[in-house]
Amino acid sequence: MSFVVKCLDCGHTAPYFPSSINCPRCNSQWREAEYDYATLAQSLPPQLPGRSFDLWRYRELLPIRNPNPTLSLGEGGSPLIQAVNLGMMLGTPNLFIKDERQGPTGSFKDRQAAVTIAALKEAGITEMVAASTGNVAIAYSAYAARAGIKLWAFVTSLVPAVKMREIALYGSQVIKVTASYDQAKQLAAEFARQRGLYLDMGARTITSIEAMKTIAFEVSEQLTALLGPVTGGDTPRWRTPDWYVQAISGGMGPLGVYKGFRELRQMGLVDRIPAMAPIQADGCAPMVNSWKKGLEQAEPVTTPRTHIETLATGDPGRAYVMLRKQVDDTHGVFESVTDEEAFRAMHILAKMEGVSAEPAAAVSFAGLFKLIRAGTIKPTDVVVINCTGHTMPAEQSVLGENWSRNVILP
């Protein structure tokens, strides 16, 4: 499969190796995979009808030379559900939920783990390090176990114990760090450096961005099947939503999804990229606050004040610069919501659509409510919202005190 890695700073192209994290010319760590889009525009669409609807359906657009089907746990291919009841309540009938809860470990991070672990296995790498607020480490643990790769998982002490136990269940080594998530990432990076181990670097990890873009590919195919192709040109095109809404911590998800829509446009399969709406928790919203102030660089949040620890990245670094450009280019918006608004959205989503989402995923729904109320998202808009993960035990703060009636029999 033909692809190269291109530096986002100097434009230098080089072959891809997971262990090579810096541009050989300028030493930048910000690079992305590039493919032969002109050839794929002709060769890929005719092959899709005969393929399974999963992540590897788009294997020619992933940085794996020889995909190994024995490593797969069935990642990708999550359903796109029309939120009929919620859409009726909000006056936005074309509202669709990309249900990433249905991944092998219950979150959209399964895509990241599947592609990254496949690349590491192909390169003969047997040990890796990752910092996580829960879902990333769970996903990596499952796929690493399947591939025979040792994982060192650095998690903050705020991560729920039930998630830490699941990480350990897969055989990963859990290192609980009593500090902020940003500090846990620094500790993990130093540990990996000292031991010479592969380190997951979030949005700088090429395979992570490449994995996330498959969400865009699937959404376009699914919307086309549900609403019909876009007509009016020489050939019918795939359909894209008007808005893509997702809760963010470090911003990797929307960065990858944007790249997916951009590649579809490069291949002539779609004619536009949706407006991007990344949502953060008020108590840790460096990107939202910086964007609203018109800042080109993010002001870090040194002390996150949110109970939604999965979204507690205080210093997004360059990811903000990149995401800000994508939001502005697509006429999108950054928005933030309170923890209470997110918990309320969890309850509404479960009661109205039968979808039990974790607090981090509910942040995106609370943001959606806010954007519709403000008139930013219009009633006629087609909106796709990423339900990024499943709630594990139901949050007590969502249900309140009187959620059950007790009956004591004599």
Image (tube, rainbow, N blue to C red):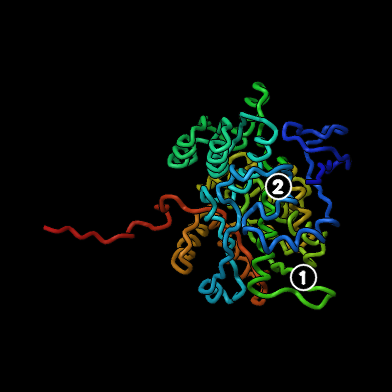
Per the image, label 1 sits on a secondary structure element best described as loop
Q: Nearer the viewer, mark 2 or mark 1?
A: 1
Above or below residue 245? Residue 314 is above
N-terminal of the pair, mark 2 or mark 1, is 2
Q: Nearer the viewer, residue 302 or 23?
A: 23
Give above or below for 226 relative to 165: below
Residue type pointed to by label 2: Ile
Which residue does the image show at 68% across and 69% down from the upper left? 376
| Of residues 121 and 245, the one drawn nearer to the viewer in this rendering | 121
Q: Quadrant of residue 4?
A: top right
Residue 209, labelled with which disc? 2
Residue 70 placement: quadrant: top right
Q: Is residue 240 left or right of residue 356?
A: right
Q: Amino acid at mark 1?
A: Arg
Mark 1 lies on residue = 237
Q: Secondary structure at mark 2?
A: helix
Q: Viewed as shown, does residue 365 lie left or right of 27? A: left
Residue 244 visible within the image? no
Task: Locate residue 82, reporting x and y percent.
Answer: 56, 70
- Taking the spot 46% from the left edge, 63% from the top edge, the residue there is 350
Spot occupied by residue 72 in the image (x, y as percentages of width and height): 58, 46
